[in-house]
Amino acid sequence: VFDVSSLNKKMGLFTYDPGFMSTASCKSAITYIDGEKGVLLYRGYPIDQLAEKCTFLEVAYLLMNGELGDKHEQAQFEHEIGQHAMLHEAMRGFIDGFHYDAHPMAMMVGIVGSLSAFYHSELNMDDPEHRRISAMRMLAKMPVIAAACYRHSIGYPYVYPRSDLSYCENFLNMMFSLPSQKYIDKDNYIDPVAVKALNLLFILHADHEQNASTSTVRLASSTGANPYACIAAGIAALWGPAHGGANEAVLSMLGEIGTVDRIPEYIEKAKDKNDPFRLMGFGHRVYKNFDPRATIIRKACYEVLERTSAKDPMFDLALALEEYALKDEYFIEKKLYPNVDFYSGIIYKALNIPVDMFTVMFTIARTAGWVSHWLEMMAEPGQRIGRPRQIYTGKDVRNV
Ligand code: ACO
């Protein structure tokens, strides 16, 4: 006589760890997190030092190569990124095929996936140089694809990347320059406050060890699949509101709350187990004390709003909500603190980035982490396919 438990016994002993709460899926030398102490290191460097002293491309070089580049190495890296930025002209037709109101993350999944159809013939995954070029290509093209998605949604012509602008300047130029303008604003120059803020946000979002999207990239890559398709899989995982979609969800939530006097009502909703509502931008799988990125972003919010003179009532509302939640027994007991996405949307809003592009911004930044993990795992000898097991809960054996 069979029963389900005896079927499972026949399979041997497994650890059952839904959500992978305590399972390490790989070894990695890229990022270290101590969730209790609120520590985040990229290649051993504390996140606050990198945020203060580096540009996003310096951090991307560090993540991919293990060390900060010297002046010459960094210049060469940035020159190469510039060379790989252009999209194949035929990709325009692909982008144009999307309906104008498609969510930009839906477009990103499709367009990045389509890179596997445009760049494949020369790809030899066994050759480290080929792998490096694929990684560079993805990092270089991501902001160009992202800006093209935005321009498509508002019916503006695409803007080509320029070799005389930095990574973040280029992105802002491709997003916002008017068809008749050479640069994005009337003074013929790109706002350095916006460039600094963008560098900061991209650095903070660049990597976070085995989060859902990075694990997705690794799992897809473990089959030997095309790298562009693997990154597209990572973008799909990032889109969800429990992951990268949270920054968009935070702004919708703040819009819904509207005024400070309604905060208690929403705190009660978040605590009510019969209500699916959660306080977006609060809580984290690993950080159980505070998210060091949230602390840096909160400070940057003050600076950006002050320097762009863009007083935003949503920031005041967010500060009030944080203060209220942090005094509440439920949030204290469950160790729920603001995460990186609680404040990032407010900065993006001040930079005129539309709300549905917030997760796309995260995508650009996290590409640095995804390609670094991909390079790391592809370089490991004896790579095995990722293949979790399950506890079977279906029918016993029966006859048709
Ligand atoms: N609001 C209210 N209650 C919450 C929240 C929240 N934001 N987050 C967690 N809880 C509660 C849960 O209901 C659960 O309560 P229970 O023990 O009574 O069942 C407890 O805290 C633990 O929560 P889990 O969902 O089990 O924690 P997990 O580690 O699986 O989830 C997550 C972490 C997904 C981030 C969760 O806190 C959440 O949904 N937060 C809101 C979405 C968000 O901000 N996501 C961005 C994450 S950061 C990033 O991806 C960049």
Image: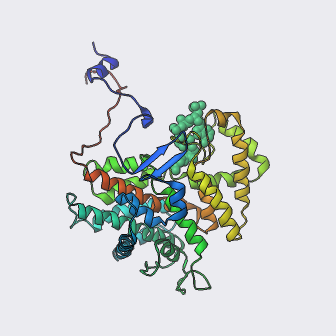
Answer above or below: position of 376 versus 170.
Answer: above
5 vs 368, nearest the viewer = 368
Q: Quadrant of the N terminus?
A: top left
Q: Is residue 290 visible?
A: yes
**Can you tell which quarter of the image residue 163 is in?**
bottom left
Give the residue at the far top of this rendering. 1
Q: Residue at position x 57%, y 82% from top?
A: 189
Quarter of the image where ligand 1 sits? top right
**Can you tell which quarter of the image residue 303 is in?**
bottom right
Q: Residue at position x 39%, y 35% from top?
A: 23
x and y, in percent, of residue 321 in the image: 71, 48
Q: Quadrant of the C terminus?
A: top left
| Colouring used for the render | rainbow
x and y, in percent, of residue 267 in the image: 70, 41
- Classify residue 309 as left or right of residue 78: right
x and y, in percent, of residue 39 in the image: 52, 46
- Classify residue 343 as left or right of residue 365: right
Count of numbered badges drawn on the protein = 0
Answer above or below: position of 120 versus 334.
Answer: below
Q: Residue at position x 46%, y 62% from top?
A: 364
249 vs 34, nearest the viewer = 34
- Classify residue 171 as left or right of residue 120: right
Q: Is residue 241 visible?
A: no
100 vs 32, nearest the viewer = 32
x and y, in percent, of residue 24 in the image: 38, 38
